[in-house]
Amino acid sequence: MPSYRYKCKSCSKEIKSSQDRNIRFIECECGQQMKRQVPNLSGSPKVTETIDTYTNTKHVQDQKEIIMSRRDEHYWKVEVPRLVQEHDTKTCLEMGWIVLDEKGRPVIQTTPPSRR
């Protein structure tokens, strides 16, 4: 059963009690009725939405950073190798898709610039 706060109007006594959710009033020691209080939240609530129950992935209200991170990661891991095959070496070097190693061989960049 959930725990609720009850407050008496006459003696201002406040208690915490586990009651059925349908019980709105309980009897106080002074003989009056104690009314169930509205629950108070400590801080702002963090609202999340479960989008994938298998992996328990959750979305928070502001998804901009998460979405940008996923988009960058997808671009550099999937799109860049495909673009390197379609474009010439000069274009790839200008775009930063490939770099030359110590021996002068091209190496495809698969991590976003923010993680290098």
Image: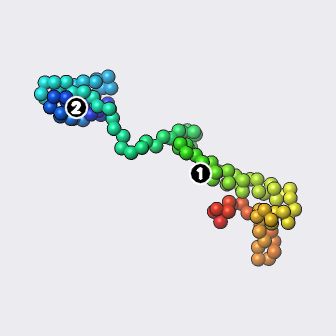
Helix, strand or loop at mark 1? helix
The residue positioned 85% from the left and 66% from the top of the image is: 90
CA neighbours of label 2 inside 10 A, class few (<14), some (14 to 19), many (20+): some
Helix, strand or loop at mark 2? strand
Is 48 or 105 nearer to us in this picture?
48
Q: Residue furthest left?
A: 30
Name the image quarter holding the N terminus.
top left
Report whether 31 appears left or right of 114.
left
The residue positioned 36% from the left and 44% from the top of the image is: 42
| Quarter of the view holding residue 62 | top right
Q: Which residue is mark 1?
A: 65
Q: Position of residue 57 (x, y in %)?
A: 55, 44
| Colouring scheme, one of rainbow, by chain, secondary structure, one colour | rainbow
Name the image quarter holding the C terminus.
bottom right
Kindly tell me whether residue 56 is visible in this rendering.
no
Kindly tell me whether residue 20 is visible in this rendering.
yes
Report whether 49 appears left or right of 17.
right
Q: Which of the marked residues, 1 or 2, is nearer the chain's N terminus?
A: 2
Is 67 or 104 nearer to us in this picture?
67
Q: Which residue is mark 2?
A: 7
Q: Amino acid at mark 1?
A: Glu
Q: Position of residue 15 (x, y in %)?
A: 21, 35
The residue positioned 67% from the left and 62% from the top of the image is: 113
Number of numbered discs visible in the structure rendering: 2
Give the spatial CA distance, label 1 vs label 2: 44 Å
Q: Position of residue 36 (x, y in %)?
A: 27, 28
Is 81 or 13 nearer to us in this picture?
13
Report whether 111 appears left or right of 108.
left
